[in-house]
Image (cartoon, helix red, strand yellow):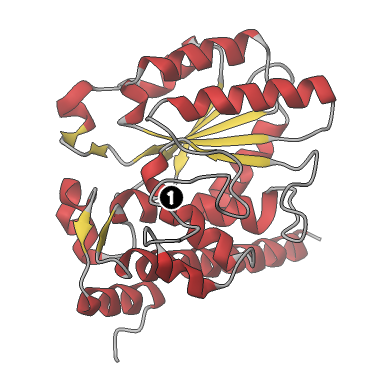
Amino acid sequence: MVNNKKAEGKEMQSFLEAFARDIRENIIDCIGSIGVGHIGGCLSIADVLAVLYGRRMRIDKSQPRLEGRDRLVCSKGHAGPAIYATLAASGYFPKEELLTLNKGGTNLPSHCDMNKTIGVDMTAGSLGQGLSCAVGMAIGSKIKDDGAYIYAIIGDGESQEGQIWEAAMLAAHKKLNNLIVFTDYNKMQIDGTVDEINSLAPLDKKWRAFGFKVQVIDGHDTLAIDNAIVKAQKSKDKPSMIILNTIKGKGVSFAEAAKVGCHSMSLSAEQCEVAKKEIRGDYND
């Protein structure tokens, strides 16, 4: 029995890691189609998106507006291409649509728009607003008693916004155990490192002080992410915060090396090919 569980765990991890690679390749195609974009913060959340859409979220691509479904709010709106990449990989729309990012008549604007893109649950506005939307959704789900989990992804630079903490207070006050929030803690933002601009440390203690159940994990370990979600779902009376220690630009060497510079960067056709080979592990081509 133990060996069977280990085998099942390895099989699931292999699937999720492959899904994360598909998402990363899609991100490169999507941003590469216009030659510039927020590559760093998109690549850093590919693994959590793979776990959510590949295993944990109760969703149906044939019924994207199904009542009572689990929902995701990507509060760090500039990571819209990562959401699009995941939805395309999940079969919500053809992958070819990724090449229309931010172009005239597209259904894929630079920031997520629920009125334009199939599968997007919340429009992304100014940084900080998305968590408030997720809290509202979680309250609504409690009122309906539909059993849905509401997930939100926030940025670490975004966490300097006061609205994040206002939403956190209400979530704890309402005992929203159906709210599971992830912080993409890649420790970099547009103007420098988070510690240089306005340090969040100790981030875990802050969230605990605000009444959240807190876990700190490797944000690129798909099994760790999956296990953390399972633990969060067992919370009886607290919302959950899962702090993902991540690397900005994860999986693409030149993006990782650029550090803060990959928050938004140019991406040539040649760089796209290099990036996709690295993501696939095709070093001999």
Q: Is residue 76 left or right of residue 285?
A: right
| As drawn, 246 above or below 21 | above
Residue holding disc 1: 80
Where does residue 196 sit, x and y in percent of width and height? Answer: 15, 27
> x, y percentage for residue 85?
49, 62
Tell me if I can see residue 225 in this picture.
yes
Q: Secondary structure at mark 1?
A: helix
Where 78 falls versus 239 (above or below)?
below
Picture coordinates of residue 41, whole percent (x, y): 34, 48
- Residue pictured at 72% horizontal, 59% vertical: 61
Q: Is residue 134 left or right of residue 209?
A: right
Amino acid type at mark 1: Gly
User: In which quadrant of the rendered image does the N terminus lie?
Assistant: bottom right
Relative height, residue 34 to residue 119 (above, below) = below
Dividing the picture into quadrants, the one containing residue 260 is top left
Quadrant position of residue 4: bottom right
Which is nearer the eye, 118 or 136?
Answer: 118
Residue 221 can be seen in this image:
no
Residue drawn at 60 percent across, 67 percent down: 93
How crowded is the residue under tag 1: few (<14 C-alpha within 10 Å), some, or many (20+)?
A: many
User: Where's residue 8, x and y in %?
Assistant: 71, 64
For this view, does 139 lie left or right of residue 187?
Answer: right
What is the quadrant of residue 229 in the picture?
A: top right
